[in-house]
Image (cartoon, rainbow, N blue to C red):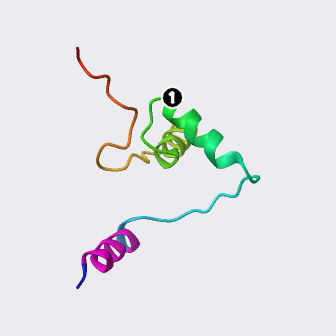
Amino acid sequence: MSNAKASNDYRRRNYDRILFQFPKGSREALREFAKSAGYESVNAWVAAVLGRETGLDLALPGEFGPRKQKEK
């Protein structure tokens, strides 16, 4: 089994996909907002916001939360 197929199979078994649609041109503004709020991606930011609003644990494994500040 190829790595791509294995990855896709894993995602299919372990995650739900929800599609959101926004007006054309919104994508970059959302990316910049998520980045400025300290998130690695729009997905991580949306999961954090929805988790707070619903009280559900929507955290994804790995480094998907707010970026950790680098120590100087």
Residue that protrudes farthest toward the top in the picture = 72
Residue 29 location (% of width, % of height): 64, 39
Q: Residue 57 in magenta?
A: no
Q: Is residue 57 left or right of residue 52?
A: left
Q: Is residue 52 left or right of residue 60?
A: right
* Dot 1 amino acid type: Ala
11 vs 50, nearest the viewer: 11
Would you say residue 9 sits in the magenta stretch? Answer: yes
Residue under the point 32% across and 27% down: 68
Q: How many marks?
A: 1
* Quadrant in which the N terminus appears: bottom left
Position of residue 56 measured from the top left corner of the image (x, y, whole percent)? 47, 45
Outermost residue, right side:
23
Classify mark 1: residues with Cα within 10 Å, few (<14), some (14-19) or many (20+).
few
Query: In the image, which residues are magenta?
Result: 3-12
Q: Identify the secondary structure beneath mark 1.
A: loop
Return the residue at label 1: 37
Res. 40 image quadrant:
top left
- Foreground pick, 51 / 7: 7
- Up/down of 51 relative to 1, above or below: above
Magenta: predominant secondary structure element?
A: helix
Q: Residue at x 40, y 73 (%)?
A: 12
Q: Nearer the viewer, residue 21 or 51?
A: 21
| Relative image position of residue 31 (x, y in whole percent) | 56, 42
> In this picture, is 19 found above or below 68?
below
Residue at the image position 50 percent from the left and 49 percent from the top: 43
Which residue is rendered at x = 40% and y = 33% of the image?
Answer: 66
Query: In the rendered view of the protein, which quadrant contains the C terminus?
Result: top left
The location of residue 20, given as percent across then percent down, is 65, 58
In the rendered image, the vertical position of residue 65 relative to residue 12, given as above or below: above
